[in-house]
């Protein structure tokens, strides 16, 4: 995802937090604003997700993506 994300208008970076005990990760992606984030079409996101899943399953030699998407949300900066 990183190379594709870095080309998107408004992308400011991402951080991954991994909980080894639970085998879960939290991915925070930072955007300049919500409008630029939501301007990316679902079709484009789904296309990139498919490429990601194919890459992961091939690299790990598994049949299904072991990294399931659980939730998308938004954090509002407190000032």
Image: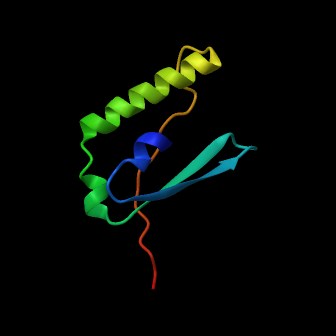
Does 2 sit left or right of 22 as displayed? Answer: left
Name the residue nearer the viewer: 6 or 51. Answer: 6
Say which residue appears at 44% left-offset and 47% top-offset.
71
Name the residue nearer the viewer: 31 or 77. Answer: 31
- When the figure is inspected, residue 39 is found, relative to residue 30, above or below; the finding is above
Colour logic: rainbow
> Percent from the top left, x then y, of residue 43?
25, 35
- The quarter holding residue 61 reads top right
- When the figure is inspected, residue 14 is found, relative to residue 32, above or below; the finding is above
Outermost residue, bottom direction? 79
| Quadrant of the image containing the C terminus | bottom left
- When the figure is inspected, residue 49 is found, relative to residue 36, above or below; the finding is above
Does 79 sit left or right of 9 as displayed? Answer: right
> Percent from the top left, x then y, of residue 55?
52, 23
Q: How many marks?
A: 0
- When the figure is inspected, residue 54 is found, relative to residue 4, above or below; the finding is above
Name the residue nearer the viewer: 6 or 43. Answer: 6
Say which residue appears at 42% left-offset and 46% top-offset.
5
Outermost residue, right direction? 21
> Percent from the top left, x then y, of residue 42?
26, 40
């Amino acid at each position: 995802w990183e190379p594709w994300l870095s080309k998107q208008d408004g992308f400011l970076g991402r951080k991954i937090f991994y909980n080894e005990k639970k085998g879960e990760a939290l991915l925070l992606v930072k955007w300049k604003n919500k409008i630029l984030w939501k301007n990316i079409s679902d079709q484009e996101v789904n296309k990139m997700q498919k490429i990601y899943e194919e890459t992961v399953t091939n690299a790990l030699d598994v049949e299904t993506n072991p990294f399931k998407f659980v939730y998308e949300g938004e954090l509002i900066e407190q000032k």
